[in-house]
Image: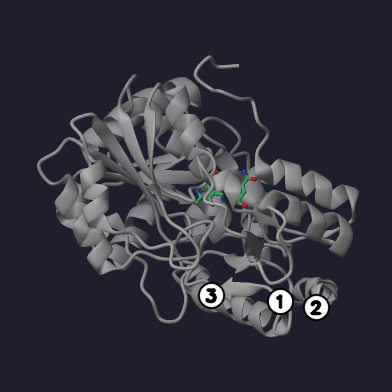
Amino acid sequence: LSPRLDSSGTTIFTVMSKLASEHKAINLGQGFPDFECDEKLKELVAKHLKEGKNQYVPLAGLPKLNETLSKKMEHLYGMPINPDSQICVTAGATQALYTAIMAFVKEGDEVIIFEPAYDCYTPQIKIAGGIVKPYIMTYPDYGIDWNKVKEMVTDKTRMIIINTPHNPSGTVLNESDMKSLENIISGTNIVVLSDEVYEHLIFDGENHQSVMQYSALFEQSLAVFSFGKTLHATGWKLGYIVGPEYLIKEFKVIHQWNVFCTNSFVQFAIAEYLAEPKNYEYLPSFFEEKRNIMNELLTGVPLTPKVAKGTYFQAYDYSEVSDMDDLEFAKYLTSKIGVAAIPMSPFYTNPPGDKVIRLCFAKKEETIEAAAERLMKLR
Ligand code: PMP
Ligand code: GLN
């Protein structure tokens, strides 16, 4: 075990998925779709595999894929991105985050994160020797007071990690949040690591705020994406990172020594598939409908949702039904009610004690229906 990690703890996703399968519970815990990705995409993957696209691709990604991505980002966020020098394809968003942290955070550097925070940020910062400075957000607002964030910045602050749409709360940042962040980092050497894996999962007419839409902010930012989320294929573990050339250059040095390059034939397939905007433009309404179905079917269940504005997760307060702590309650739901959930506390350094769990709605309607039927037992 790295001497920098204080525990070798297993992720909450592994713990709850294992418990779900032991109890044959419906798994609304770990975030993955229970439906298939597009047949057309699978055919493209099979075609490229059969045609022998089975050897190494360049370190930063298949050039054709990087061109597709550059066009897509310019179309969506209006920022011209050089496909040769500003993108690097990675083994999922997790490896992009890890590599970025290893590239920019040194021993003793401070990194501001917003908790509840996706669970890999803190251990990755610690492995790099960095110091985690958590800003605490709580149910139901999960809001950010940027004046307080500004007060947290010191001359040791090297990185700020944001995540919008936000896992696990389902909230999103708005234009004013982005401008406040842009102001805070102006004139500093802070790198913003922007986790945008849920860029397309945004509802109620909201627009995703990417660091790419703010030119001064983007000069100091790296944005991270995951094909797992966009293509309903979390098991493929492919993603990418985008940023100004001087940051991507440093990123690639570390990337070169930890993976060099990633899976070839899937990159060929995605390069063709994502060249057609209709293959991602349907995503907001597709997942908004799932959220609405979940909210309709769970009406009457004594769990109070913080209605998700993005991601495929929703936070639920369960204080009406139990005063167990959230881990205990998630285990109870899984083993006794038959629906697996994720407690919020593992996303905090010091959990605030909210009675909140997270449920995933990236599921077939019949799965949500079956889960709702079981959850009715809580009444
Ligand atoms: N960031 C966030 C916010 C996530 O929810 C996830 C998990 N899907 C990741 C990063 C990791 O993505 P990947 O599976 O592509 O590594
Ligand atoms: N991102 C997924 C979630 O939040 C889990 C990924 C994982 O299992 N590490 O549920």
- Foreground residue, 115 or 178? 115
Question: Which residue is pictured at 9% across the width and 41% down the height?
Answer: 187
Q: Which residue is mark 2?
A: 379
Graded by Cα atoms within 10 Å as few (under 14), some (14 to 19) or many (20 or more), the crowding at tag 1 reads some
Residue type at numbered disc 3: Val
In the image, taking residue 43 as reference, residue 207 lies left or right, namely: left
Q: Position of residue 180 (x, y in %)?
A: 20, 58
Q: Is mark 1 within 8 Å of ligand 2?
A: no
Q: Position of residue 149 (x, y in %)?
A: 27, 49
Task: Name the quadrant of the N terminus.
Answer: top right
Q: Is mark 2 within 8 Å of ligand 2?
A: no
Task: Residue at the far left: name it.
Answer: 187
Question: Which residue is pictured at 51% across the width and 45% down the height?
Answer: 348
User: SS for tag 2?
Assistant: loop
- Above or below: residue 156 compared with residue 288: above
Graded by Cα atoms within 10 Å as few (under 14), some (14 to 19) or many (20 or more), the crowding at tag 3 reads some
- Foreground residue, 290 or 282? 290
Closer to the chain start, of discs 2 and 1, is 1
Question: Which residue is pictured at 73% across the width and 64% down the height?
Answer: 322
Q: Which residue is mark 1?
A: 302
Residue type at numbered disc 2: Arg
Q: Which residue is mark 3?
A: 307
- Of circles 2 and 3, the one toward us is 2
- Above or below: residue 18 compared with residue 2: below
- Above or below: residue 129 compared with residue 296: above
